[in-house]
Image (cartoon, grey):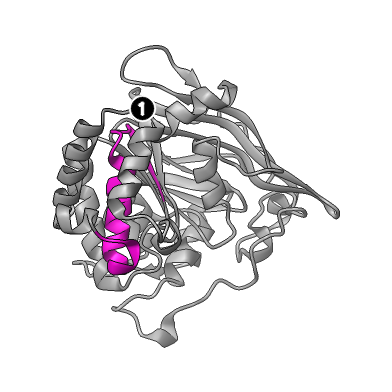
Amino acid sequence: MNAVDHSTTDLNSSTDTILEIRNASVTFDMDRGQSRVLDNVNMDIEREEILGVVGESGSGKSMFASALLDAVVDPGVLTGEITYYPERGQPIDLLDLSPKELKKVRWEEISMVFQGAMSSWNPTLSIKGHFEETLDAHNANFSEGMDRARELLADLYMDPERVLNSYPHELSGGMKQRALIALSMVLEPQVLVMDEPTAALDLLMQRSILKLLREVQEKYEVAMVFITHDLPLVAELAERIAVMYAFEFVEVSTIDDIIRNAAHPYTRALLNATPNLDVHVDEMRPIEGSSPDPVHTPEGCSYHPRCPLADDECVSEDPGYHAVTAGHDVACFHWEQSREAIPYTLPFQDDSTEANQ
Protein backbone atom coordinates (compact mmCIF):
# COMPACT_ATOMS: atom_id res chain seq x y z
CA MET A 1 0.00 0.00 0.00
CA ASN A 2 1.22 3.49 -0.73
CA ALA A 3 1.27 6.31 1.78
CA VAL A 4 -2.11 6.88 3.40
CA ASP A 5 -3.38 10.19 4.74
CA HIS A 6 -4.57 9.33 8.23
CA SER A 7 -5.06 12.94 9.27
CA THR A 8 -8.86 12.63 9.11
CA THR A 9 -8.95 9.21 10.77
CA ASP A 10 -9.53 8.99 14.53
CA LEU A 11 -7.11 6.30 15.66
CA ASN A 12 -7.46 7.40 19.27
CA SER A 13 -10.72 7.45 21.19
CA SER A 14 -9.40 9.84 23.83
CA THR A 15 -7.77 13.24 23.83
CA ASP A 16 -5.36 12.14 26.58
CA THR A 17 -2.54 11.23 24.21
CA ILE A 18 0.94 10.52 25.52
CA LEU A 19 2.62 9.66 22.19
CA GLU A 20 1.55 11.02 18.82
CA ILE A 21 3.10 9.50 15.70
CA ARG A 22 2.56 11.21 12.36
CA ASN A 23 3.84 10.08 8.96
CA ALA A 24 6.71 8.12 10.52
CA SER A 25 8.85 6.36 7.92
CA VAL A 26 12.14 4.48 8.14
CA THR A 27 14.24 3.92 5.02
CA PHE A 28 17.54 2.25 4.24
CA ASP A 29 19.44 2.93 1.03
CA MET A 30 20.54 -0.35 -0.53
CA ASP A 31 22.37 -1.30 -3.72
CA ARG A 32 19.12 -2.63 -5.21
CA GLY A 33 17.05 0.40 -4.17
CA GLN A 34 15.52 2.12 -1.17
CA SER A 35 14.17 -0.20 1.50
CA ARG A 36 11.15 1.27 3.33
CA VAL A 37 10.66 -0.66 6.56
CA LEU A 38 8.16 1.75 8.13
CA ASP A 39 5.74 3.43 5.74
CA ASN A 40 4.08 6.70 6.78
CA VAL A 41 2.71 5.27 10.03
CA ASN A 42 0.25 7.28 12.12
CA MET A 43 -0.86 6.37 15.62
CA ASP A 44 -1.95 7.99 18.90
CA ILE A 45 -1.03 6.14 22.09
CA GLU A 46 -3.13 7.02 25.10
CA ARG A 47 -1.86 7.66 28.60
CA GLU A 48 -1.95 4.46 30.68
CA GLU A 49 -3.32 2.28 27.86
CA ILE A 50 -1.88 -1.05 26.72
CA LEU A 51 -1.57 -1.10 22.94
CA GLY A 52 -0.77 -4.40 21.25
CA VAL A 53 1.04 -4.33 17.90
CA VAL A 54 0.78 -7.61 15.97
CA GLY A 55 1.84 -8.97 12.60
CA GLU A 56 4.05 -11.52 10.88
CA SER A 57 7.82 -11.42 11.13
CA GLY A 58 9.16 -8.74 8.84
CA SER A 59 6.02 -6.58 9.00
CA GLY A 60 7.76 -3.62 10.63
CA LYS A 61 6.80 -4.13 14.28
CA SER A 62 10.30 -3.84 15.73
CA MET A 63 11.07 -0.85 13.54
CA PHE A 64 7.96 0.87 14.90
CA ALA A 65 9.23 0.17 18.42
CA SER A 66 12.65 1.63 17.65
CA ALA A 67 11.04 4.69 16.08
CA LEU A 68 9.16 5.45 19.30
CA LEU A 69 12.50 6.08 21.01
CA ASP A 70 14.25 7.55 17.94
CA ALA A 71 16.53 4.52 18.20
CA VAL A 72 16.68 3.45 14.55
CA VAL A 73 20.23 2.24 13.90
CA ASP A 74 22.43 3.73 11.18
CA PRO A 75 22.20 3.85 8.23
CA GLY A 76 18.42 3.89 8.72
CA VAL A 77 16.72 7.26 8.32
CA LEU A 78 13.65 8.07 10.44
CA THR A 79 11.39 10.88 9.21
CA GLY A 80 8.01 12.25 10.26
CA GLU A 81 6.89 13.50 13.66
CA ILE A 82 6.91 11.73 17.02
CA THR A 83 5.63 13.90 19.84
CA TYR A 84 5.74 12.99 23.52
CA TYR A 85 3.32 14.69 25.90
CA PRO A 86 4.68 14.64 29.46
CA GLU A 87 2.32 15.00 32.41
CA ARG A 88 3.76 18.46 32.98
CA GLY A 89 5.44 20.86 30.62
CA GLN A 90 5.44 21.37 26.89
CA PRO A 91 5.17 18.62 24.24
CA ILE A 92 8.53 17.18 23.16
CA ASP A 93 9.43 16.56 19.51
CA LEU A 94 11.56 13.44 19.84
CA LEU A 95 13.10 13.81 16.39
CA ASP A 96 14.33 17.32 17.19
CA LEU A 97 16.32 16.50 20.34
CA SER A 98 20.06 16.67 20.81
CA PRO A 99 21.80 13.38 21.78
CA LYS A 100 21.99 14.62 25.40
CA GLU A 101 18.30 15.51 25.48
CA LEU A 102 17.33 12.24 23.83
CA LYS A 103 19.34 10.26 26.40
CA LYS A 104 17.31 11.90 29.17
CA VAL A 105 13.99 11.04 27.53
CA ARG A 106 14.99 7.40 27.02
CA TRP A 107 14.56 5.34 30.18
CA GLU A 108 13.34 8.34 32.19
CA GLU A 109 10.24 9.02 30.07
CA ILE A 110 10.08 6.24 27.47
CA SER A 111 11.75 2.92 28.20
CA MET A 112 12.12 -0.26 26.18
CA VAL A 113 12.42 -3.98 26.83
CA PHE A 114 14.24 -5.43 23.85
CA GLN A 115 13.60 -8.86 22.39
CA GLY A 116 15.58 -11.61 24.08
CA ALA A 117 16.43 -11.21 27.76
CA MET A 118 19.26 -13.70 27.31
CA SER A 119 21.33 -11.24 25.26
CA SER A 120 20.32 -8.06 27.12
CA TRP A 121 22.51 -8.65 30.18
CA ASN A 122 26.25 -8.19 30.60
CA PRO A 123 27.38 -11.61 31.92
CA THR A 124 30.26 -10.07 33.87
CA LEU A 125 27.99 -7.71 35.84
CA SER A 126 25.63 -8.65 38.64
CA ILE A 127 21.95 -7.72 38.33
CA LYS A 128 22.53 -5.11 41.03
CA GLY A 129 25.40 -3.75 38.97
CA HIS A 130 23.05 -3.24 36.01
CA PHE A 131 20.65 -1.23 38.17
CA GLU A 132 23.50 0.82 39.62
CA GLU A 133 24.90 1.50 36.14
CA THR A 134 21.51 2.71 34.89
CA LEU A 135 20.92 4.98 37.89
CA ASP A 136 24.42 6.43 37.59
CA ALA A 137 24.08 7.09 33.86
CA HIS A 138 20.99 9.22 34.50
CA ASN A 139 22.27 10.92 37.69
CA ALA A 140 19.36 9.45 39.62
CA ASN A 141 19.20 9.29 43.39
CA PHE A 142 20.95 6.00 44.14
CA SER A 143 19.20 5.14 47.41
CA GLU A 144 15.73 5.91 46.10
CA GLY A 145 16.47 4.10 42.86
CA MET A 146 17.60 0.90 44.56
CA ASP A 147 14.58 1.00 46.87
CA ARG A 148 12.41 1.25 43.77
CA ALA A 149 14.33 -1.65 42.15
CA ARG A 150 13.61 -3.86 45.16
CA GLU A 151 9.94 -2.89 45.10
CA LEU A 152 9.67 -3.64 41.37
CA LEU A 153 11.34 -7.03 41.75
CA ALA A 154 9.00 -7.87 44.62
CA ASP A 155 6.03 -6.76 42.50
CA LEU A 156 7.23 -9.25 39.89
CA TYR A 157 7.21 -12.01 42.53
CA MET A 158 10.96 -12.36 42.99
CA ASP A 159 13.22 -12.20 46.02
CA PRO A 160 14.90 -8.79 45.52
CA GLU A 161 18.12 -9.53 47.40
CA ARG A 162 18.64 -12.91 45.79
CA VAL A 163 18.10 -11.48 42.31
CA LEU A 164 20.22 -8.36 42.83
CA ASN A 165 23.14 -10.41 44.12
CA SER A 166 22.94 -12.88 41.23
CA TYR A 167 24.68 -12.85 37.87
CA PRO A 168 22.55 -13.31 34.75
CA HIS A 169 23.58 -16.95 34.25
CA GLU A 170 22.28 -17.78 37.72
CA LEU A 171 18.71 -16.82 36.80
CA SER A 172 16.19 -18.74 34.71
CA GLY A 173 14.88 -17.29 31.46
CA GLY A 174 11.67 -16.13 33.10
CA MET A 175 13.54 -14.51 35.99
CA LYS A 176 15.89 -12.72 33.59
CA GLN A 177 12.90 -11.39 31.66
CA ARG A 178 11.17 -10.16 34.81
CA ALA A 179 14.37 -8.55 36.07
CA LEU A 180 14.71 -6.80 32.71
CA ILE A 181 11.19 -5.41 33.06
CA ALA A 182 12.10 -4.13 36.54
CA LEU A 183 15.27 -2.53 35.14
CA SER A 184 13.29 -0.79 32.40
CA MET A 185 10.93 0.65 35.05
CA VAL A 186 13.48 1.77 37.63
CA LEU A 187 13.56 5.39 36.41
CA GLU A 188 9.76 5.59 36.48
CA PRO A 189 9.06 6.04 32.76
CA GLN A 190 5.60 7.00 31.53
CA VAL A 191 5.77 4.70 28.49
CA LEU A 192 7.14 1.15 28.32
CA VAL A 193 7.77 -0.32 24.86
CA MET A 194 8.15 -4.12 24.82
CA ASP A 195 9.45 -5.89 21.71
CA GLU A 196 8.48 -9.60 21.79
CA PRO A 197 9.28 -9.79 25.53
CA THR A 198 7.99 -13.35 25.94
CA ALA A 199 9.13 -14.86 22.62
CA ALA A 200 11.79 -17.17 24.08
CA LEU A 201 9.66 -18.39 27.01
CA ASP A 202 7.38 -21.39 27.35
CA LEU A 203 3.61 -20.98 27.28
CA LEU A 204 3.15 -21.12 31.06
CA MET A 205 5.82 -18.49 31.69
CA GLN A 206 4.38 -16.28 28.94
CA ARG A 207 0.99 -16.26 30.65
CA SER A 208 2.58 -15.65 34.03
CA ILE A 209 4.50 -12.62 32.78
CA LEU A 210 1.38 -11.19 31.10
CA LYS A 211 -0.44 -11.37 34.44
CA LEU A 212 2.45 -9.63 36.17
CA LEU A 213 2.62 -6.94 33.49
CA ARG A 214 -1.04 -6.14 34.00
CA GLU A 215 -0.47 -5.77 37.75
CA VAL A 216 2.61 -3.58 37.24
CA GLN A 217 0.83 -1.43 34.65
CA GLU A 218 -2.09 -0.79 36.97
CA LYS A 219 0.10 0.00 39.98
CA TYR A 220 2.54 2.32 38.19
CA GLU A 221 0.02 3.77 35.71
CA VAL A 222 2.36 3.38 32.75
CA ALA A 223 1.37 3.21 29.09
CA MET A 224 2.58 0.01 27.40
CA VAL A 225 3.21 -0.84 23.77
CA PHE A 226 3.41 -4.65 23.54
CA ILE A 227 4.81 -5.94 20.25
CA THR A 228 4.30 -9.57 19.25
CA HIS A 229 3.46 -11.94 16.40
CA ASP A 230 1.05 -13.80 18.70
CA LEU A 231 -2.38 -12.16 18.52
CA PRO A 232 -4.16 -14.44 21.05
CA LEU A 233 -1.30 -13.91 23.51
CA VAL A 234 -1.54 -10.12 23.46
CA ALA A 235 -5.34 -10.40 23.61
CA GLU A 236 -4.89 -11.38 27.25
CA LEU A 237 -3.15 -8.09 28.01
CA ALA A 238 -3.92 -5.29 25.56
CA GLU A 239 -6.94 -3.00 25.46
CA ARG A 240 -6.41 -2.01 21.83
CA ILE A 241 -4.75 -3.79 18.90
CA ALA A 242 -2.96 -2.41 15.86
CA VAL A 243 -2.41 -5.00 13.12
CA MET A 244 0.67 -4.38 11.00
CA TYR A 245 1.27 -5.57 7.45
CA ALA A 246 3.89 -4.39 4.95
CA PHE A 247 5.29 -1.75 7.33
CA GLU A 248 2.01 0.03 8.13
CA PHE A 249 -1.16 -0.48 10.16
CA VAL A 250 -4.02 -2.14 8.29
CA GLU A 251 -6.53 -2.47 11.14
CA VAL A 252 -6.89 -0.76 14.53
CA SER A 253 -9.54 -1.31 17.18
CA THR A 254 -10.26 -2.61 20.66
CA ILE A 255 -9.16 -6.13 21.40
CA ASP A 256 -12.77 -7.36 21.53
CA ASP A 257 -13.53 -5.92 18.09
CA ILE A 258 -10.38 -7.36 16.54
CA ILE A 259 -10.86 -10.85 17.97
CA ARG A 260 -14.61 -11.12 17.38
CA ASN A 261 -15.14 -8.90 14.37
CA ALA A 262 -11.88 -8.66 12.44
CA ALA A 263 -12.51 -6.77 9.20
CA HIS A 264 -9.26 -6.91 7.24
CA PRO A 265 -8.65 -10.11 5.24
CA TYR A 266 -5.11 -10.22 6.63
CA THR A 267 -6.28 -10.03 10.26
CA ARG A 268 -8.77 -12.83 9.65
CA ALA A 269 -6.12 -14.92 7.89
CA LEU A 270 -3.74 -14.27 10.78
CA LEU A 271 -6.32 -15.61 13.22
CA ASN A 272 -6.81 -18.70 11.04
CA ALA A 273 -3.06 -19.33 11.03
CA THR A 274 -2.73 -19.06 14.81
CA PRO A 275 -2.37 -22.30 16.82
CA ASN A 276 -5.66 -22.91 18.60
CA LEU A 277 -6.46 -25.63 21.11
CA ASP A 278 -10.11 -25.64 19.98
CA VAL A 279 -9.27 -26.33 16.33
CA HIS A 280 -7.71 -29.48 14.89
CA VAL A 281 -4.30 -28.91 13.31
CA ASP A 282 -5.69 -30.00 9.93
CA GLU A 283 -8.10 -27.06 10.01
CA MET A 284 -5.37 -24.45 10.52
CA ARG A 285 -4.72 -22.49 7.34
CA PRO A 286 -1.35 -20.81 6.89
CA ILE A 287 -1.37 -17.56 4.91
CA GLU A 288 -0.33 -18.36 1.38
CA GLY A 289 2.49 -16.37 -0.19
CA SER A 290 5.05 -14.26 1.63
CA SER A 291 5.39 -10.79 3.08
CA PRO A 292 6.36 -8.12 0.55
CA ASP A 293 9.92 -7.07 -0.14
CA PRO A 294 10.51 -3.63 1.47
CA VAL A 295 12.26 -2.50 -1.73
CA HIS A 296 9.39 -3.58 -3.98
CA THR A 297 6.18 -3.17 -1.98
CA PRO A 298 3.15 -3.73 -4.25
CA GLU A 299 1.21 -0.74 -5.56
CA GLY A 300 -2.35 -0.26 -4.39
CA CYS A 301 -3.18 -2.42 -1.39
CA SER A 302 0.04 -4.12 -0.32
CA TYR A 303 -1.89 -7.26 0.69
CA HIS A 304 -3.52 -7.80 -2.71
CA PRO A 305 -1.07 -10.50 -3.95
CA ARG A 306 -2.17 -12.73 -1.03
CA CYS A 307 -5.79 -11.67 -0.67
CA PRO A 308 -8.70 -13.82 -1.94
CA LEU A 309 -10.87 -10.70 -2.29
CA ALA A 310 -8.43 -8.63 -4.35
CA ASP A 311 -9.67 -7.10 -7.59
CA ASP A 312 -8.42 -4.50 -10.06
CA GLU A 313 -9.24 -1.67 -7.66
CA CYS A 314 -7.05 -3.25 -4.96
CA VAL A 315 -4.17 -3.61 -7.42
CA SER A 316 -4.26 0.01 -8.59
CA GLU A 317 -5.73 2.07 -5.74
CA ASP A 318 -4.76 2.67 -2.12
CA PRO A 319 -7.76 1.69 0.04
CA GLY A 320 -7.18 4.29 2.75
CA TYR A 321 -9.05 3.83 6.03
CA HIS A 322 -12.69 2.87 6.37
CA ALA A 323 -14.64 3.11 9.65
CA VAL A 324 -16.15 -0.23 10.64
CA THR A 325 -17.48 1.25 13.88
CA ALA A 326 -16.41 4.17 16.04
CA GLY A 327 -12.74 3.55 16.82
CA HIS A 328 -12.47 0.51 14.51
CA ASP A 329 -10.61 1.44 11.32
CA VAL A 330 -9.53 -0.83 8.49
CA ALA A 331 -7.53 -0.27 5.32
CA CYS A 332 -9.55 -2.42 2.90
CA PHE A 333 -12.04 -1.81 0.10
CA HIS A 334 -13.85 -5.09 0.72
CA TRP A 335 -13.97 -5.32 4.50
CA GLU A 336 -17.73 -5.90 4.46
CA GLN A 337 -17.26 -9.06 2.35
CA SER A 338 -14.32 -10.39 4.37
CA ARG A 339 -16.48 -11.90 7.11
CA GLU A 340 -18.26 -14.29 4.78
CA ALA A 341 -15.21 -14.96 2.61
CA ILE A 342 -12.79 -15.72 5.46
CA PRO A 343 -14.52 -17.29 8.51
CA TYR A 344 -12.38 -18.13 11.52
CA THR A 345 -12.64 -19.71 14.94
CA LEU A 346 -12.04 -17.64 18.04
CA PRO A 347 -8.50 -18.28 19.31
CA PHE A 348 -9.62 -18.95 22.88
CA GLN A 349 -12.42 -20.77 24.71
CA ASP A 350 -15.64 -18.78 24.58
CA ASP A 351 -19.40 -19.23 24.78
CA SER A 352 -19.60 -18.78 21.01
CA THR A 353 -16.87 -20.56 19.09
CA GLU A 354 -17.46 -19.25 15.60
CA ALA A 355 -16.60 -15.69 14.54
CA ASN A 356 -18.53 -15.50 11.29
CA GLN A 357 -20.21 -12.20 12.06
Instruction: Locate residue 283 relative to residue 24 in the image: left or right.
Output: left
- Residue 12 at least partly seen: no
* Residue 217 position (above or below residue 235): above
Q: Residue 331: within the magenta?
A: no
In the rendering, at what x and y percent does residue 214 appear?
21, 49
The answer to whether residue 253 is above or below residue 58 is above
Q: Position of residue 323 (x, y in %)?
A: 46, 39
Residue in the picture at 29% in, 41% down: 185
Residue 156 visible in the picture: yes
- Number of residues whose C-alpha sits closer than 10 Å to that of mark 1, classed few (under 14), some (14–19) or many (20 or more): few
Q: Please, what is the three-letter code of the amino acid marked with disc 1? A: Asn
Q: Quadrant of residue 115?
A: bottom left
Residue at 34%, 69% (x, y): give it. 201
Residue to which mark 1 is pinned = 139
Q: On the rendered image, what quadrant is the C terminus found in? A: bottom left
Q: Residue furthest right?
A: 31
Of 136 and 39, the residue lying toward us: 136
Q: Residue at x 37, y 39 (%)?
A: 134
Q: How many marks?
A: 1
112 left or right, relative to 145: right
Q: 154 or 254: nearer the eye? A: 154
Which residue does the image show at 86% across and 53% down from the upper left?
31
Image: 150 above or below 264: above
The residue furthest top is 89
Magenta part of the chain: 166-194
Percent x, y for residue 341?
A: 50, 66
